[in-house]
Amino acid sequence: MKGLLLKDFYMMMKYCRSAIIVSVIFLILSALTGGNLFMIIYPVLICSMIPMNLISYEEQSGWEKYCAALPYSKAEIVSSKYIIGLVITGIISLCTVIAQTTQSAQEPMELQDYGVTFLVIAMVCLLGTGILLPPLYKFGVAKGRLIFVVIICILFGGVGFFSAYFSQGEDTAINFFLLLARIPGGWIVLAGIVFVLVLYALSWWISILIYRRREL
């Protein structure tokens, strides 16, 4: 497993550097533009697609057939992508909180608000990765990407609509996040992250089942 994770890390550093750079730029812009929703969500969307990009490069290079001759189980091969997804989620969520900390220097936030922002970004990123991977393993990168785009458009379109509605015309994502924090006890956020983690685990299990039945 360690070898698979190192391989994915090296591939990410070589082939996904542009996605990482673009994400950093958008997070910086989000801090400078007052927490614009698009500036925050777009890097999350890009980062949630990194596992898909890794799988795409593997398909193009014939890695799957080569890997079949190595002492790795299909469960380990699939699990490496989900672990990478968890690592990416943690990093992008932390970077978003840092960006919002810079942005909120003029408008101080409470400690729990930073926690809410971290959890909401983590939920969105995990949800994107969890939705993406099973169709990729089932239909391949080409068809799986189309399914992902349709689902993500619906998902982020809904987030954008509710953000605009609850922000009362103010184009700030932070208002949408803080709306969740105002709910007593923040239970909706905790329930949401638990729900998404369960979905992520279910997606992980489904992808392993699909990949085990797949002919390489």
Image: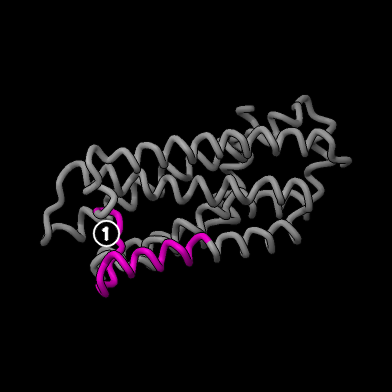
Look at the picture and state if 83 lies above or below 106.
above
Look at the picture and state if 34 lies above or below 72.
below
Q: Residue at x 24, y 37 (%)?
A: 185
Looking at the rendered structure, the secondary structure element under dot 1 is: helix
* Residue nearest the viewer, comparing 61 with 120: 120
Report the magenta stretch's main SS. Answer: helix
Judge left or right: residue 62 versus residue 190: right
Residue 153 point in image, percent of width and height: 55, 66
Residue 187 point in image, percent of width and height: 31, 38
* Crowd band around label 1 with a 10 angstrom C-alpha radius: few (<14), some (14–19), many (20+): many
Residues drawn in magenta: 155-178
- Quarter of image, res 203: top right
Residue sitting at the far top: 71
Judge left or right: residue 215 versus residue 37: right
Look at the picture and state if 131 lies above or below 17.
above
Q: Residue at x 34, y 42 (%)?
A: 188
